[in-house]
Image (cartoon, grey):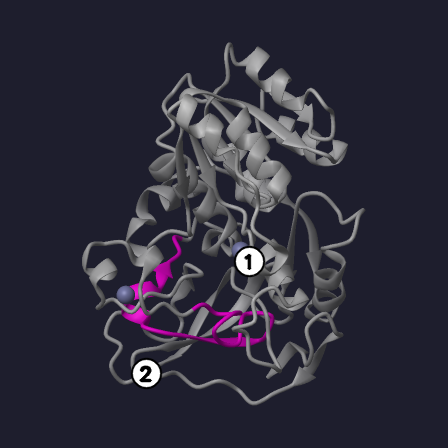
Amino acid sequence: MRAVVFDEFGGPATVREVPDPFPAPHGAVVRVAATGLCRSDWHGWAGHDRTIALPHVPGHELAGVVEAVGEDVRGWRSGDRVTVPFVCACGACGQCASGNHQVCERQTQPGFTGWGSFAELVALDHADVNLVGLPDAVDTVAAAGLGCRVATAYRAVSAQGRVRPGQWVAVHGCGGVGLSAVMVAVAAGARVAALDVSPTALDLARSMGAEVTVHAGDEDAVAVVREVSGGGAHVSLDTLGSEVTCAASIRCLRPRGRHVQVGLLPPDLGHPAVPMARVIALELEIVGSHGMAAHDYGELLSLVASGRLRPDLLVTRRLTLDEAGPALAAMGEPGYPAGVTVVLLAGVAQ
Ligand SMILES: [Zn+2]
Ligand SMILES: [Zn+2]
């Protein structure tokens, strides 16, 4: 098969022929139709996740068609249209037994613990636990985001953020997951303040229904959020993952507000200073959010199928597999295009 491969962290990521994967007894091989470019792919390429073994194929938010299944798989067969949460759970550990597959103790992640979806084929573990069938009404480009950015945003806003209609939600960072969070929060009836340094990203946030947009580089950005929300946001998300956005998210909350950390903060980049004095004084809540279990996808799929959530509108660039490597490397550079980039695989029905 053709796949985007890199041999060293931060080095060239180029397409070459590699052996086809085959399914584990409990696993499946999926023919990739579309795969999104996510900031965590960039972190992996840049070397912020040293558990990645080289050479490596990135990519973890995908939609496609089942090509083959292992002998123990009961629920899926070749030809099924699917997506998969980026956390592939084991289905058998204590966390899985409690339904929390997104924090499975023996999880695997395509594009991190193994080769990912910047390829014609990708092997996925525990297919019966992890594959998610796609309704016909959910197109492939929209579905590519359901493995990471949209599902992550959905769980961060609804389950971890516990956002209620009429509440103020601040979203720090309007990349793929941030814009998805804006869309999900608006659909939940919340009032949204979106923050980013890119005017184009803020325009997109406004088009997704953000009521207020704030240039995150401004000194008074946090004060503006507190002002417009009448004393601070009820819920605030750091969807970028940086010391600055994490702290700003906590500082813009009202008393007893809730901060949800979504963007990765790789230890390799240092441990961020978190304003814990404010957490205590205002009795703030800090929670993390890490993908979403396959069995929780039903409501999200209905919202997308019915058109109430439109992840396709976030997609601003469609690339070929050959263009994926250079685009991945450019993700850490200033001037990286706003909105979501999706790689479409040639010759696969979309
Ligand atoms: Zn991702
Ligand atoms: Zn597990």
* Residue 243: x %, y % from top left: 61, 42
Write down the quadrant of residue 324 in the picture: bottom right
With respect to residue 258, does 70 lie above or below? Answer: below
Residue identifier under label 1: 267
Write down the quadrant of residue 189 in the picture: top left
Please give left or right for residue 301 compared with residue 339 in the image.
Answer: left
Disc 2 element: loop
Residue at 30 percent of width and 58 percent of height: 101
Magenta span: 109-135
* Residue 330: x %, y % from top left: 76, 58
With respect to residue 133, does 16 lie above or below? Answer: below
Foreground tag (1 vs 2): 1
Residue contact at pointers 1 and 2, CB within 8 angstroms = no
Residue 131 is one of the magenta-drawn residues: yes
Decide which of tag 1 and tag 2 comes sooner along the chain. Answer: 2
Q: Nearer the viewer, residue 134 or 282?
A: 282
Q: In which quarter of the image is the N terminus?
A: bottom right
CA gap, disc 1 to disc 2?
Answer: 36 Å
- Seen as rendered, the residue at the extreme bottom is 19
* Residue 202: x %, y % from top left: 69, 30
Residue 349 seen in the figure: no
Residue at 53 percent of width and 87 percent of height: 20
What's the mark number on residue 109?
Answer: none
Residue 251 seen in the figure: yes
Residue identifier under label 2: 70
* Residue 241: x %, y % from top left: 58, 46
Residue type marked 2: Gly
Q: In which quarter of the image is the C terminus?
A: bottom right
Residue type marked 1: Pro
Residue at 55 percent of width and 79 percent of height: 53
Please give left or right for residue 77 compared with residue 58 in the image.
Answer: left
